[in-house]
Amino acid sequence: MAPPMTPTVSFTAMPALHDVSLKEFWKSHFNIADAVFLITSAWKEVTVRCLCAAWRPLWPECVLQRDFEGFEELEEEAVVHEIVALGNSMGLEVDDDDVEELVEEHSKELSTEELLELHKEENETLKRSLTSEESGEEEDKEESRIIPAKDLKDAFFCWSKLSKLAED
C-alpha cells in the first residue's frame, strides 16, 4: 500500500476535484490514516537537539547538559570489555581486572616531575625510532605489532582523562 499523500499535494494532484472546496476535500478524501501518516512523517524529522532545545527552558533538569548527537553513551563496563577485546585481538593477554587496575593507577593526577619524565621518555623513544629508520634497520613484522605496556598505560590514561572530561 502506498503512503497517503499530504492534503495539499493530493488536492492539487486531482484535477477533477478543482471545483471542490478544501473543507469538502478534507471531509471526503482525508481520513485518520492520512493524519497518522503525516504525524509520523513529521515526528521522524524531529532531532534530539531540537527536543533538548525545546525542553531546556521548560524543564532543565530532564535535559542533558551536553548534546553529543550521534554518539552513544557507553557504560564503563562496556568500555572495559571493548578495551579487553581490542587487546586480545592484538595478541595481548588482557582481562577486565588488568584494565580496571590500569585505570585506577592513572586516576590520580601526575606531578610536574612525572610529566617531565614522561615527556623525556617520549623524546628518547622518538630519537631512537628516527635513528633506526635512518640507519636502515627494519624490525621484524611480528615485533612491530607488539605494543609496549607503557604505551598501553599511556593510552588508557588518556582514555580515562577523556572520559572524565565527558562526565564533567
Image: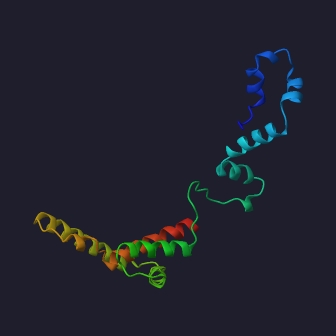
Where, quadrant-wise, is the C terminus in this rendering? bottom right
Front residue of this view, candidates 31 and 53? 31
| Relative side of 23 to 55, left or right | right
Residue extending farthest left: 135
Residue 118 position within the rendered picture, expressed as x and y whole percent measured from the top left: 32, 75
- The answer to which of 93 and 55 lies nearer the viewer is 93
For the point 65% across and 50% down, the residue is 49
Picture coordinates of residue 7 (x, y %)? 78, 29
In this rendered view, identify the residue nearer to me: 123 or 70.
Answer: 70
Question: Coloured how?
Answer: rainbow
Q: What residue is drawn where x is 34% and y is 76%?
A: 91
Is residue 38 among what the camera can see?
Answer: yes
From the viewer's perspective, tell me whether residue 133 is left or right of residue 162: left
Number of numbered discs visible in the structure rendering: 0
Instruction: State whether residue 164 is above or below residue 13.
Output: below
Image x and y of residue 57, in percent: 75, 52
Image quarter in which the N terminus is found: top right
Task: Find the residue positioned furthest to the front.
Answer: 1
Q: Which residue is more in the foreground, 150 or 47?
A: 47
Residue at the (76%, 40%) spot, across then down: 37
Q: Which residue shows up at 51% across the image and 72% down it? A: 79
Image quarter of residue 5: top right
Report x, y in % for residue 36. 79, 42
Residue 148, quarter of the rendered image = bottom left
The answer to whether residue 168 of the structure is visible from this angle is no
